[in-house]
Amino acid sequence: QVQLVEFGGGLVQAGRSVRLSCAASGSIFSINTMGWYRQAPGKQRELVAAITRNGNTNYADSVKGRSTISRDNAKNTVYLQMNSLKPEDTAVYYCHTVVQTTEALSWTHYWGQGTQVTVSS
């Protein structure tokens, strides 16, 4: 099995920054994409940013230019730095990864438990 543990989040004032991190552990053979999704109340979960093992990134238009996703492959950890936060960034942020475990050759999606980010105006 694979576990994702998220750190960061909390209550932040608009205009400030937040850094989220997510560490994957367990029966990991290889990790492909790592990323962050978010879900605001009454809305669908949406992609915030993702990064491949080779470092290719993808951002939602709503965070592009003020967010940076990075990863440490040696630590199986992904980071999300979000700057110039807005109240509409308020959501539960979920870590997501696609993992090839040591038990199976297939790629499996895993999700973190979620961390709340609340941006006050």
Image: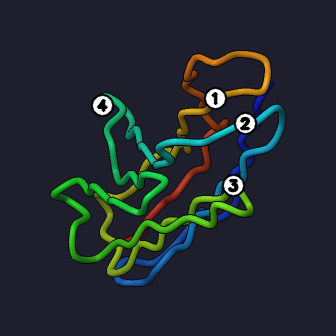
Tell me the CA gap for discs 2 and 1: 5 Å
Q: Earlier in the sequence, mark 4 or mark 2?
A: 2
Which is in the foreground here, disc 1 or disc 3?
1
Amino acid type at mark 1: Gln
Q: Residues within 10 Å of mark 1 (few under 14, many from 20)?
A: some
Q: Which mark is residue 43?
A: 4
* Rendering coords of residue 17 (x, y %): 46, 80
Disc 1/disc 3 C-alpha distance (Å): 13 Å
Between 97 and 81, the residue placed more toward the observer is 97
Kindly indicate whether the residue at mark 1 contacts the one at mark 2 (C-beta within 8 angstroms). Answer: yes
Secondary structure category for the residue under label 1 = strand
Closer to viewer: mark 4 or mark 2: 2
Mark 3–mark 2 Cα distance, whole angstroms, equals 11 Å
The disc, 3 or 2, on the residue closer to the chain's N-terminal end is 2
**Residue density around tag 3, few if under 14, some if 14–19, many if 20 or more, within 10 Å:** some
Specify the quadrant of the image occupied by residue 62.
bottom left
Q: Is residue 27 left or right of residue 115?
A: right
Kind of residue at disc 4: Lys
Q: Position of residue 113 (x, y in %)?
A: 67, 36
**Which one is in front in this view, the residue at disc 3 or the one at disc 4?**
3
The span from disc 4 to disc 2 (Cα, nearest Å) is: 34 Å
Residue topped by disc 3 = 76
Q: Quadrant of the C terminus?
A: bottom left
Give coordinates of residue 60: x percent, y percent. 23, 53
Name which quarter of the figure residue 61 lies in.
bottom left
User: N-terminal of the two: label 2 or label 1?
Assistant: 2
What residue did someone put label 1 on?
100
Mark 2 secondary-structure assignment: strand
